[in-house]
Amino acid sequence: MTFPAINIALKKWNIEDLEDYAFEFTLYDDYIHHKDESYFIEYFKNGLFCDAEGKLFKMVAKAEMTQKWRNWLQFIPGVWKTKVIFKDTYQKISVEELRTYLLARLSELGNEKLF
């Protein structure tokens, strides 16, 4: 998988999610920086991600954190992170299909002020 990758499983975007949880839409590496299990299930688990080469991957699980010191220092930004596990779907999406998807999601937001 080549990063960055965008979550294309979300069928509808809303302005609140974009303001509060911008990282559900784009991953810059194979880690998430949020430890809440419900957050992972809602935004990531079984999500379909398109990588920088147009290949589609499904996020299937997250690896257990083995470094105990990260738990002790989790209050420091960037210390707590867990690796996520992707499964290759052996499918590709064209640039035009991705462009259409992004424009459709952005048009759903209407004229609301972004950020």
Image (cartoon, rainbow, N blue to C red):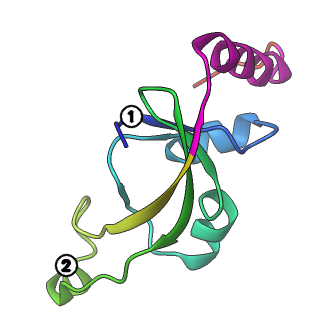
Taken as a whole, is the magenta stretch helix, strand or loop? Answer: helix
For residue 73, which numbered disc appears in the image?
Answer: 2
**First in residue order: circle 2 vs circle 1:** 1
Q: Callout 1: 10 Å neighbours few (<14), some, many (20+)?
A: some
Residue located 73% across and 14% down the image: 100
Is residue 69 rendered to the left or right of residue 89? left
The amino acid type found where label 2 is placed reads: Leu
* Residue name at image x 81 percent, y 39 percent: 11
User: Which residues make up the magenta segment?
Assistant: 90-110
Across and down, in percent, residue 29 comes to 32, 47
Residue 75 image offset from top left, x and y in percent: 27, 73
- Which of the pair 101/40 is nearer the observer? 101
Q: In this orientation, which residue lies closer to the viewer: 90 or 41?
A: 90
Number of numbered discs on residues: 2
- Which mark, residue 77? none
Above or below 101: residue 34: below
Q: Residue furthest front?
A: 90
69 lies left or right of 20 = left
Q: Position of residue 93 (x, y in %)?
A: 62, 26
* Quarter of the C terminus within the rendering: top right
Tell me if residue 44 comes above or below residue 106 in the rendering.
below
Question: Which amino acid type is shown beneath numbered disc 1?
Answer: Pro
Q: Where is residue 96, by image quadrant?
A: top right
Give yes or no for residue 95 being in the magenta stretch. Answer: yes
- Percent of width and height locating residue 87: 51, 59
Residue sticking out furthest to the left:
69
Q: What residue does disc 1 label?
A: 4
Q: Residue at x 23, y 86 (%)?
A: 66
Q: Residues within 10 Å of mark 2 (few under 14, many from 20)?
A: few
**Residue 60 figure quarter:** bottom right
Q: Is residue 1 left or right of residue 66?
A: right
